[in-house]
Image: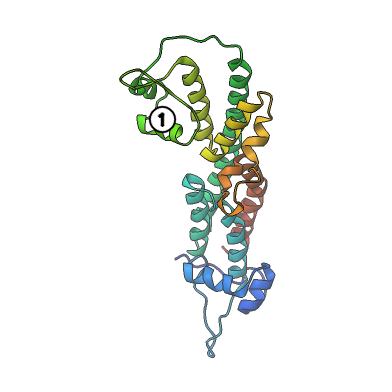
Amino acid sequence: MKELNPFGKGKLRYSTTGQVARQNNIHANTVRIYENWGYISPVPRAKNGYRRFTPLHSDQVKLIRLAINFTWLSGRIRKLALGVIISSARGELERSLTFANSLEDKIKSAVLEAELALKITGEWRDKSSSERHYNEGYFSGGAARLLDTTKDTLRTWERNGLIRINRTIPEKYRIYFPRDIKRLKVISALRKAGYSIVSIRRMLLKLENDAGADIRYFLDTPSPDEAEDLVYATDRWLSKVKSLNEITPELVNHVEYMIKNYC
């Protein structure tokens, strides 16, 4: 663990658990949880056993409060956010800044990818009503190769109501026609951009009843019959990544401030 000046450029002054909690508008137990998780540097104890928090600890807690917003997402975004937190706790603030900058870039890319997927969906919606029907089709393996995915993924999308596939008679093999392939390309683009299966199904079902429905709205807005405790961040993907994009500069700036003050 790298040695930092825990008081920075300020006075030699310790804080209690309650004071750190109030400074960051959280419960004192939350501060203790962060300590137990290793999200802040080791906290010294006074002779009476009370914790003695330094300004560094308080700024680490503030950093956690910013970075933890990103940990509700999975994959690369979550790993980068945790990298910001853990590196700070280890006193590796330069490394924490590297993670923060990468996180900022990743969120910006996520916003662009989400918007591009929306554009692709809109173009597909506008053309699908006038496209011609063709008889030639693909079996599951050929369709999967064409879409650069797997047969299991195609079956998952079908089971989750994203598409209904015709079956050959009497063999009952799945047959994917060009119209299906185009729909699957849209689904693939939305999934790669981060949209959940639930939000995609919601939007597609709405389009079946109203071809002019607002794609952006229904991809990003859970319906009233979706239980609130079952709604995830990816069910509001576009608004989520946009809100995170707004706070990443604050996250980066805070790490830069910590480097200047404690290194």
Q: Identify the image quadrant of the C terminus.
A: bottom right
Lateral position of residue 223 relative to residue 161, left or right: right
Q: Is residue 19 left or right of residue 197?
A: right
Q: Which of 199 and 163 lies nearest the eye of the viewer? A: 163
Q: Quadrant of residue 21?
A: bottom right
Kindly identify the residue that appears in the image at 62 percent across and 53 percent down.
Answer: 251
**Above or below, 36 relative to 123:** below
Residue at image position (44%, 9%) is: 135
| Residue at x 66%, y 46% (from the top left corner) | 224
Residue at the location (42% across, 35% down)?
A: 156
Residue 74 visible from this viewpoint: yes
Foreground pick, 229 / 79: 229
> Which amino acid, mark 1?
Leu
Taking the view exactly as shown, the residue that stands out farthest to the front is 170
Residue named by callout 1: 154
Residue 149 location in percent, x, y?
39, 29
In the image shown, does 15 or 226 lie closer to the viewer?
226
Nearer to us in this view, 168 or 64: 168
Instruction: Estimate how packed mark 1 is, as few (under 14), some (14 to 19) or many (20 or more) residues with alpha carbons within 10 Å.
Output: many
Q: Is residue 70 above or below residue 168?
A: below
- The residue furthest left is 171
